[in-house]
Amino acid sequence: MINKEMTIQDILTTDIGIADILMASGMHCLGCVMASGENLEQACAVHGIDVDGLVANINEYLAAKK
């Protein structure tokens, strides 16, 4: 499971397939230097994305892979 306190880099390390979910949500800065310094909540705030909905989508994706 991921949470909104994790950095984008840590999230992508969990499962590279999450990149597609992030990109589809409007977060196109996955290679940005901030991806290793900002947590998901901060990145979502910058991009106007609902962090709780995004976390739920990512965790649903991960659960379906088990």
Image: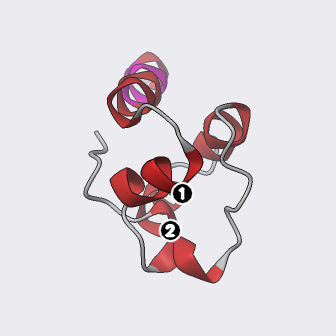
Residue 27 in picture, x, y percent from top left: 66, 48
Considering only vertical position in the picture, is 59 above or below 43?
above
Q: In the figure, residue 60 lies in which quadrant?
A: top left
How is the model colour-coded?
Answer: secondary structure
Residue 64 in picture, x, y percent from top left: 45, 16
Considering only vertical position in the picture, is 5 above or below 58?
below
Does the magenta portion include 66? no
Q: What label sits on residue 12 in the rendered view?
A: 1
Q: Is residue 65 left or right of residue 3?
A: right
Asked if the residue at tag 1 contacts the one at tag 2, i.e. Cβ–Cβ closer than 8 Å, the answer is yes
Q: Is residue 21 left or right of residue 59?
A: right
Region rendered in magenta: 59-63
Which residue is at 71% across, 38% downward? Answer: 20
Does the magenta portion include 60? yes
Considering only vertical position in the picture, is 40 above or below 33?
above
Q: Which residue lies under the disc numbered 2?
A: 9
The amino acid type, in three-letter code, at marker 2 is: Gln
Q: How many residues crowd mark 2 within 10 Å: few (<14), some (14–19), many (20+)? A: many
Placement of the N terminus among the 4 image quadrants: top left
The amino acid type, in three-letter code, at marker 1 is: Leu
Q: Is residue 40 left or right of residue 34?
A: left
Placement of the C terminus among the 4 image quadrants: top left
> Taken as a whole, is the magenta stretch helix, strand or loop?
helix
Which residue is at 74% across, 53% downward? Answer: 28
Q: In terms of secondary structure, where does tag 1 sit?
A: helix
Q: Is residue 14 left or right of residue 12?
A: left
Which residue is at 50% across, 68% downward? Answer: 9
